[in-house]
Amino acid sequence: MKKEIVIVVSILIGCNSILGQTNTRDSINNLLKEAPQFTIFKDNYFITGFQVNEPINSNNSDAKFQISIKDRLTNAVLPFNSFLYFTYTQKSFWNIYKNSSPFSENNYNPGMGLGKFYLNKHRLLNMVGIGLDHESNGKDSIDSRSWNKVSFHYRIAFPGSITLAISTWIPFAYKSDNPDLIKYIGYFEANLIKKSRDNRFVVEITAKKGATWDNRGSFQTQFYYRIGKNNNQYLSLQYYTGYAESLLHYSESTNSIRIGLVFRPSNFFLHE
């Protein structure tokens, strides 16, 4: 990690479509208080695959896994009826098909922020949030990569089990490690989720546009199939194309497909 430890955070509360469970501010607050205090934040997964359009070998095949947690720091309702959260996400790239199976990189992302929930005209639970977060690959010297951002999030649920999340951010304290990082990750992300009526199938699309007029940015499509009727375990197929899949190689374009097991956040807290 960078020598100066930035205490950070990303607000990061998401919500899935909840129909007609509440219709007052107090009942929304009660619903949040009754939810588990410590939960999954983003997807927790273990997936493996290879780079597309290349002969498959140990150099372009790997495993990718992520651990992501969230903790509500207090049950007290804060000003503007908001809630305070701490999050931590770690994404790792593991060369399991090479001799000695080394890790090529770990990306660490602690965060904290405020979120506010409200009902839209369809009585679906939506969210707005603001926060601060830090991401680093924990390396030093020429391999060091880190950045910080103030982020703003808006999530809206639509009828038909459709959710749209939009995030934008103001980056800071990143130029010494990776001065052109923003050219590849940009200032904006859009995330669209569509679920089947029985929540058995999920399709998720995430897009970022780099801060240039060329094709820099990224596009990720993920398909999920829930293994059991009443759990959060899914088989998943992920396709990623573009830049900045990892911090170390943010300026290199990748085109990868991976498959594996995913544990998704349950019911109405979803990732940012």
Image: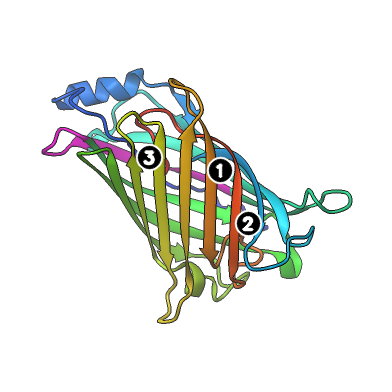
Give the amino acid type for the residue marked by disc 3 in the picture.
Answer: Ile
Return the x and y of residue 116 as percentages of the image width and height.
Answer: 27, 38
Q: Nearer the viewer, residue 261 or 89?
A: 261
Tag count: 3
Mark 2 or mark 3, whichever is nearer to me: 3
Mark 1 and mark 2: Cα distance apart in space: 19 Å
Magenta residues: mostly which secondary structure? Answer: strand
Quadrant in which residue 117 is drawn: top left
Judge the density around disc 3: few (<14), some (14-19), many (≥20) Cα neighbours within 10 Å: many
Say if the magenta span includes residue 122.
Answer: yes
Mark 1 and mark 3: Cα distance apart in space: 13 Å
Return the x and y of residue 134 as percentages of the image width and height.
Answer: 53, 53
Query: Colour scheme in the image?
Result: rainbow
Q: Nearer the viewer, residue 238 or 242?
A: 238
Quick check: 166 above or below 83? below
Residue most toward the bottom? 213
Task: State which tag comes first along the sequence, 1 or 2.
Answer: 2
Judge the density around disc 1: few (<14), some (14-19), many (≥20) Cα neighbours within 10 Å: many
The stretch of residues the image draws in magenta is 109-124
Q: Secondary structure at mark 3?
A: loop
Side of 1 where 266 appears, left or right: left
Q: Secondary structure at mark 2?
A: loop
Q: Secondary structure at mark 1?
A: strand
Judge the density around disc 2: few (<14), some (14-19), many (≥20) Cα neighbours within 10 Å: few
Task: State which tag comes first along the sequence, 2 or 3.
Answer: 2
Q: Which residue is mark 3?
A: 13
Give the amino acid type for the residue marked by disc 1 in the picture.
Answer: Thr
Q: Which residue is mark 2?
A: 4
Give the amino acid type for the residue marked by disc 2 in the picture.
Answer: Glu
Residue 89's disc number: 1
